[in-house]
């Protein structure tokens, strides 16, 4: 054993966590400083769902090098795709209190099949889709055409396939014993078992080998110089193809690693003499572990290396990479999770309480947080997608999709370690170009951290003359009518503009109008840049192994849903009904309290073309200059529940949006100085802020006379075709909504979908867009059964997910607790815990 290695290793690992100023000689630290990277893991409540169910999820974003939790990106994007890679649903999760938690409803008409759930941040697009979080989900259709429980579709038989061969260290060295890994995939991207017969160019059979797991296997051979080799591979379905092995390279220098008794031996194979001054670089996630000369007999102690994928690089004197090898290191003992049931045998609809404690290997308490999922073991198959440990330590550092990553960590599987090493030989680590950074050539990110929503585009003048002149004199005004938000941005000389620094929920409509320094820009088209999302079609196939056992569980789950008449989260599925009559029911508070109303049809009959002209024709409304009067008093304006107040004594600007169901608490905005919303509220926030704002309720206003408006609200300039209705409220209703004895003119706009359908062409002088907004939060539903009547009710309760909590934090003693009510099914549930300690250690427990 070389004592130099054991002297340098602890110091080198320590060096990687020192301040950047002390790491000027460490190119790895410089690269991480210039281009830090994120990893993402998503814990879902289960891996199998029924159409109409809801996927509850908690995303954890960590620094790729240290695995410490970070919340620099403002949003996490989550996608559900079907077997063909087509997008089924996409959501955008806003960071709240440094947490990313949300839900993804499964469409009620989703067909039976394997789906892929993926998640990423905008900053992760720099690495490419290979490094996005990805996991397989199985979704069963709710019912067939005749109402019967459908049978899952059979897996397609193996069609065309390909086998690739990967010599250890990258090359076959003639005259030396070389290890070769191989991997077999179908044309659909699924792994397949193969039997391979190895032959040389003279037809001599050398060996017959078989895959071990997930289409991978390995063998040893001693190639000869000047000879070529091939393999005839056959799948279980009988398909047979020939594949060539790499040609032996007499000039190659190849790294070989051997693990034994807690040590890793490093050897270099070559057909001739070794080059002088060979350099060995060892790192884990960009943390430099060793950088020095290679010499025969070099040994490393496994416990001195971090846990995870370790990259070993052999370089020549000029810094050129000669050979590469990946090795998975188990590292030191991780976090211990102790789970204790306070009520070991809960009965039907009875409270089940649990206590949790996190400790290290020495029994010391650990601070951290975790999410918990409790599912009915009789209705939900066991997880197949791995956990946060497999994500952070394994799959997030390998390109492409890793099938059944949890199987490589099973202590009761004697072949798990050998299969894991074959995975290291066939899939590469490419987060950074290590040889390039060792030469001082550092990678830079293309996409910046996302700090808020953005809308960009350009304006184009209509006509043939002077279409591009003086565009820089204009500004782009943005209005969000539903929430009363106003913003503007300069227009550059080329007509382009960028609006940012705001947050709004999904389905929010943004109205864009170019304005000149005096008046409004005439005869201009607003062209908004379309949203772009990464290509993300890499499938994460649900493994065929074990699927047969899952079919009975699927049938049980489907029977539960059919008995309840709804899916897991009260997404009710009903048969079609014929509606023969329509009853008009007031949808909003303004509509219910209106003394006079015009709907869209009545507005169209007036023959006017502007909102102001329409208001002027309504009964009882009088206009004097820039003031509208009703019952002898100036009126307030309201648009989609937002009250516009132009007085200097007005209330503070609101800080949260109205309720989504439109039965909303009235909000108000000061037209004399519209405030920018507070961004970690449900409306928006300053980048980096993590303070949630609660809904602003109607406050008491100081009565004051209203004279000339300082300015009319911006929504009065919107096209009249966008208006769904206009309501007039008298001063008594106005007192209820505004606190003052003044009437209100309330304008309700059509939905974004209705407005978009009005014109197929471009609209002049105005643009409307509804980019993907953040998801409105919701809580997991679980019945409380607090009264004897509710516990004894005959309403069936067959929840497949009994409990979901996205965030539970431990105290200083490492302790936490949670509880829930059982369902009508026998108390046989599975509890899955996933999280992180404050220093980035994975927290995993399942029972």
Image (cartoon, rainbow, N blue to C red):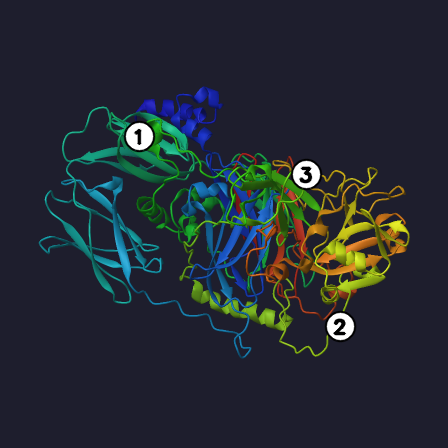
CB contact under 8 Å: marks 1 and 3? no
Q: Position of residue 648 (x, y in %)?
A: 82, 37
**Residue in the foreground of this view, choosing between 654 and 614:** 614
**Residue in the foreground of this view, choosing between 35 and 745:** 745
Q: Residues within 10 Å of mark 1 (few under 14, many from 20)?
A: many
Q: Position of residue 322 (x, y in %)?
A: 25, 34
- Per the image, the residue denoted by label 1 is 299
For the residues labelled 1 and 3, the Cα–Cα distance comes to 51 Å
Say whether residue 31 is left or right of residue 119: left
Give the quadrant of the N terminus. top left
Say which label, 2 or 3, has the lower sequence index. Answer: 2
Tell which residue pokes out farthest to the left in this image: 202
- Per the image, the residue denoted by label 3 is 691
Say whether residue 639 is left or right of residue 325: right
Residue at 36% x, 47% y: name it. Answer: 420
The answer to whether any part of residue 846 appears in the image is no
The answer to whether any part of residue 613 appears in the image is yes
Say which label, 1 or 2, has the lower sequence index. Answer: 1
Q: Helix, strand, or loop for circle 3?
A: loop
- Per the image, the residue denoted by label 2 is 583
Tell which residue pokes out farthest to the front in this image: 465
Q: Helix, strand, or loop for circle 2?
A: loop
Q: Residues within 10 Å of mark 3 (few under 14, many from 20)?
A: some
Q: Helix, strand, or loop for circle 1?
A: strand
Residue 620, by quadrant, is bottom right
For the residues labelled 1 and 2, the Cα–Cα distance comes to 82 Å
Q: Residues within 10 Å of mark 2 (few under 14, many from 20)?
A: few
Q: Position of residue 325 (x, y in %)?
A: 30, 38
**Residue in the foreground of this view, choosing between 591 and 170:** 591
């Amino acid at each position: 054993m070389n004592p130099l290695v054991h002297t340098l290793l602890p110091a080198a690992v320590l060096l990687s966590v020192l301040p950047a100023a002390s790491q000027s000689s460490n190119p790895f630290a410089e690269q991480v400083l210039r281009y830090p990277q994120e990893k993402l893991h998503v814990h879902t409540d289960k891996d199998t769902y029924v159409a109409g169910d809801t996927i509850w999820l908690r995303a954890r974003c960590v620094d790729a090098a240290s695995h410490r939790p970070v919340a620099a990106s403002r949003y996490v994007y989550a996608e559900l795709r079907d077997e063909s890679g087509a997008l089924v649903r996409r959501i955008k999760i806003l960071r709240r209190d440094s947490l990313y938690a949300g839900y993804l409803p499964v469409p009620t008409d989703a067909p039976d099949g394997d789906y892929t759930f993926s998640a990423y941040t905008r900053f992760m697009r720099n690495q490419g889709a290979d490094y996005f979080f990805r996991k397989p989900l199985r979704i069963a259709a709710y019912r067939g055409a005749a109402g019967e429980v459908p049978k899952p579709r059979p897996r397609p038989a193996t069609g065309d396939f390909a086998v690739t061969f990967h010599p250890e260290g990258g090359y076959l060295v003639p005259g030396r014993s070389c290890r070769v890994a191989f991997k077999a995939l179908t044309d659909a991207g699924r792994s397949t078992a193969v039997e391979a017969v190895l032959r040389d160019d003279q037809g001599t059979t050398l060996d017959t080998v078989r895959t071990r797991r997930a289409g991978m296997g390995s063998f040893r051979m001693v190639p000869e110089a000047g000879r070529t080799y091939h393999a005839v591979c056959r799948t279980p379905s009988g398909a047979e193809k020939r594949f060539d092995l790499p040609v032996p390279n007499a000039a190659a220098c190849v790294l070989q690693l051997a693990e034994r008794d807690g040590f890793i031996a490093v050897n270099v194979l070559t057909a001739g003499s070794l080059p002088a001054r060979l350099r060995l670089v060892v790192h884990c996630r960009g943390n430099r572990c060793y950088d020095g000369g290679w010499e025969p007999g070099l040994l490393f102690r496994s416990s001195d290396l971090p846990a995870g994928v370790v990259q070993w690089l052999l370089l020549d004197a000029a810094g050129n990479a000669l050979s590469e090898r990946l090795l998975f290191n188990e590292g030191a003992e991780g976090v211990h999770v102790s789970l204790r049931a306070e009520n070991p045998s809960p009965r039907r609809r009875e409270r089940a309480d649990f206590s949790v404690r996190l400790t290290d290997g020495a029994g010391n308490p650990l601070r951290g947080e975790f999410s918990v999922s409790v599912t009915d073991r009789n209705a939900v198959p066991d997880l197949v997608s791995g956990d946060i440990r497999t994500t952070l330590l394994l799959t997030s550092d390998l390109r492409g999709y890793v099938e059944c990553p949890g199987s490589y960590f099973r202590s009761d599987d004697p072949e798990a370690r050998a299969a894991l090493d074959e995975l290291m030989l066939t899939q590469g680590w490419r987060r950074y170009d290590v040889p390039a950074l060792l030469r001082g050539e550092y990678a830079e990110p293309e996409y910046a951290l996302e700090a808020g929503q953005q809308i960009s585009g350009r304006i184009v003048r209509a006509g043939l003359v002077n279409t591009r002149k003086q565009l820089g004199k204009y500004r782009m005004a943005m209005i969000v009518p539903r929430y009363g938000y106003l913003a503007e941005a300069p227009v550059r000389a080329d007509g382009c503009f960028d609006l940012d620094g705001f947050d709004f929920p999904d389905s929010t409509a943004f109205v864009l109008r170019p304005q000149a320094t005096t008046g409004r820009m005439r005869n201009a088209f607003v062209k908004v840049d379309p949203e772009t999302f990464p290509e993300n079609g890499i499938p994460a196939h649900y493994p065929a192994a074990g699927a047969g056992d899952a079919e009975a569980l699927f049938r049980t789950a489907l029977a539960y849903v059919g008995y309840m008449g709804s899916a897991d989260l009260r997404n009710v599925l009903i048969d079609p009904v014929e509606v023969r009559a329509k009853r008009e029911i007031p949808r909003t508070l303004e509509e219910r309290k209106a003394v006079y109303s015009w709907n869209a049809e009545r507005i169209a009959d007036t023959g006017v073309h502007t909102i102001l002209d329409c208001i002027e024709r309504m009964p009882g409304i009088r206009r004097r200059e820039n003031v509208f009067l009703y019952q002898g008093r100036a009126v307030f304006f309201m648009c989609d529940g937002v009250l516009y107040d132009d007085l200097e004594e007005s209330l503070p600007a609101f800080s949260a949006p109205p309720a989504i169901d439109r039965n909303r608490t009235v909000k108000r905005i000061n037209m004399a100085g519209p405030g920018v919303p507070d961004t970690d509220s449900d409306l928006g926030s300053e980048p980096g802020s993590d303070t949630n704002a609660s809904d602003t309720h109607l406050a008491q206003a100081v009565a004051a006379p209203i004279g000339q408006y300082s300015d009319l609200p911006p929504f009065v300039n919107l096209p009249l075709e966008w208006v769904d209705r206009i309501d007039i409220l008298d001063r008594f209703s106005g007192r209820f909504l505004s606190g003052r004895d003044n009437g209100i003119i309330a304008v309700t706009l059509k939905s974004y979908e209705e407005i978009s359908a009005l014109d197929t062409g471009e609209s002049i002088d105005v643009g409307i867009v509804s980019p993907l907004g953040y998801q409105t939060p919701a809580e997991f539903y679980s019945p409380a059964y607090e009264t004897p009547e509710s516990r004894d009710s005959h309403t069936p309760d067959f929840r497949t997910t009994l409990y979901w909590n996205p965030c539970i934090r431990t105290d200083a003693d490492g302790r936490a607790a949670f509880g829930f009510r059982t369902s009508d099914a026998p108390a046989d549930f599975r509890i899955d815990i996933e999280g992180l300690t404050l220093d980035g250690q994975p927290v995993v427990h399942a029972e």
